[in-house]
Image: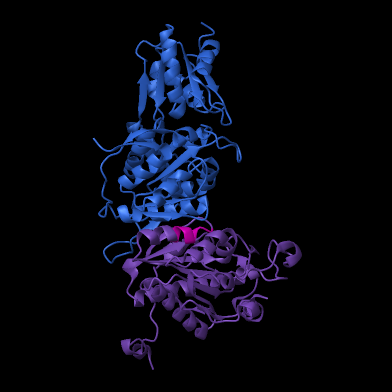
Amino acid sequence: MGELRLMKGNEAIAEAAILAGVDAYFGYPITPQSEVLEYLTLQRPEERTGMVVLQAESEIAAINMVYGAAGTGKKVMTSSSSPGISLKQEGISYIAGAELPCLIVNVVRGGPGLGTIQPSQADYFQSTKGGGHGDYRLIVLAPASVQEMADFVDKGLELAFKYRNPALILSDGLIGQMMEKVEFPEQKERVTSFDQSWVTTGKTKERERNIITSLNLDPEKQYQHNLKLQEKYRRMKEDIMYETFDCDDAEFLLVAYGSSARICQKAVDEARSSGKKLGLLRPITLFPFPEEVIAKFARQVKGILSVELNAGQMVEDVKLAVNGRIPVYHYGTPGGKIFTPDDILKAIDEKLMGGY
Amino acid sequence: MDIKEIIKPENLVHKRTPLMTDANLSYCPGCGHGTVHHLIMEVVEELDIQQDTIGIAPVGCSVLAYDFMDIDMTQAAHGRAPAVATGIKRLWPEKYVFTYQGDGDLAAIGTAETIHACNRGENIAIFFINNGIYGMTGGQMAPTTLEGMKSSTTPYGRDYKTMGHPIKITELVAQLPGTSFVTRQAVHKPGNVRKTKKAIRKAFEVQKEKMGVAFIEIVSNCNSGWKMTPNDSNKWMEENMFPFYPLGDIKVEGKIVKDLMKDLV
């Protein structure tokens, strides 16, 4: 058992990054995730592990530092919050196009625009449908606890390197700011020996030069490259992660991720205590999305409520998975307002069970 | 002297560096890009650092620089080459990292990355090709387009009252403590080619000593964008570009060696 500490979600991500042997972090301050960069600089990671930590002049510069550094084959990451993540989208598209592994953390706040610094899940579309220009996908992990904020750093990097694709931790201001106990693993060594067959290290006489690029002016080559990417995204299905609560005999199902799922758990407990057969499915990977699991539940339950801190985004993917078999509703509060378990119970009565 | 005599090894006066690939250069005949590519690769060959050199290609005419230079390269988003170079250099601090950028890339969309990489004193070389125009997109106004100069988006000439002034980014970065060697050169004549090569060599040496940014501006022609013959464009460059962008060293070993106020006004 590793060390047990009481920490904010943002601090847990930073500590986990050092412990995971991350080689470099490039960031720019933005609320509600500034603790990541603050914690890292306070920890002197250059002394603890030799990790590079750099405050860039903008989110745009930070993601392009990640792009350059990811091309060296080492473990690199950045973090930001919604408006900052929007600024990074061009760079993320390049990273996805050039097939580089890296980790991006989005501690989501309410939008659109400058919005609010309150928690939100309004960046679901941006995260799971690509976000920048072009046909690409990110591996998206949605933590629901401070423990998972820490665990998903290593997990995200593992998946990023498995598929040579950017991975995104889609958190929010609630999980980023709240304190919980978190158990950390042992310090991992920074890896010095790794697959350098594709990375920019300097061309030797023994091999062809390595080029990191997302440019293919030949339309046939660009087409083939896109087909290869799509094949890769389909393969990611083998890494789908989800959790179920009280689903075995459930007649109605909530689908929620991240902080919403935490609130939904309480709602399920209360519904169960009043005799309602309610279950909860929590997708952990939002891409790849557990659509087959939802399709299976569509043959078991009478209706599904997608509960999100937004105006209704994941509900579209739930509907696609259900494919019209049963009614699917959305309950959510957009713009940074957080619902309570009671709000959810009310929505369950009004929307989900109202017709039955 | 017959042909057999001429090709004897002892009569060799110039050899194409093997670090340039066999790909046909995509640049217009008369353009300076090819010359600068050759010079950088000649220096990398002479210093024997191919195995330790990583280049960054920008967006612009030289976006395909990696097709021509036989070294590891990363292609950067428009303007972001100094940030990309920072990421690489921080993780490979013993490697040689350079960016190759045009005026639109470096002095318009990428101004922040340029200024801040220079201000942090990243140990990289920045090769900056200034031809006062956006070449690849078809000759639009660049940040360095001269006052009165015609381009496809300044068809009646650049009017500073509404379009701003041409920016002397090289003089600006020279004032930052993070730059150690800042110079402005050209490649339109053999003498200038030799001086530019010397500057490129110095840029790599500065990097080895970890003295901060080496910033090499090369004022170049864009005969296609300027709508001139190569010869006319070189003449026009001498008469119009050089008075505003004077050639020579601006900062050497961290010390400004030119009266910047005079040049900036």
Q: Is residue A40 magenta?
A: no
Q: Which chain is blue?
A: A
Question: Picture quarter containing residue A273?
Answer: top left
Query: Is A145 drawn above or below residue B167 in the view shown?
Result: above
- The answer to whether residue A126 of the structure is visible from this angle is yes
Please state the horizontal and vertical placement of residue B54, each as a whole percent of the image: 38, 64
Please name the predominant secondary structure of the magenta segment in the image. helix
Q: Nearer the viewer, residue A95 or A348?
A: A348
| Residue B140 place in picture, x, y as percent | 65, 62
Q: Is residue A246 above or below residue B156?
A: above
Instruction: Determine whether, in the image, residue B260 is placed left or right of residue A225.
Output: right
In the picture shown, does residue B93 fall above or below A169? below
Q: Which one is in front, A297 or A333?
A: A333
Quarter placement of the N terminus of chain A: top left
Bounds of the magenta segment: B79-85
Q: Residue A190, image x and y in percent?
A: 28, 51
Rendered image coloring scheme: by chain
Colour given to chain B in the rendered image: purple
Q: B11 or A322, which lies in front?
A: A322
Q: Is residue B109 left or right of residue A22?
A: right
Residue B47 appears left or right of A132: left
Q: Quadrant of residue B93?
A: bottom left
Residue positioned 35% across, 45% down in the render: A17
Residue extending farthest left: A1
Left or right: residue A132 compared with residue B164:
left
Residue A352 on image: x %, y %: 51, 12
Exactly how many numbered labels are in the figure? 0
Residue B26 in sight from this viewpoint: no
Residue A149 in the image: above or below residue A76: above
Residue at 41%, 37% in the rendered image:
A9
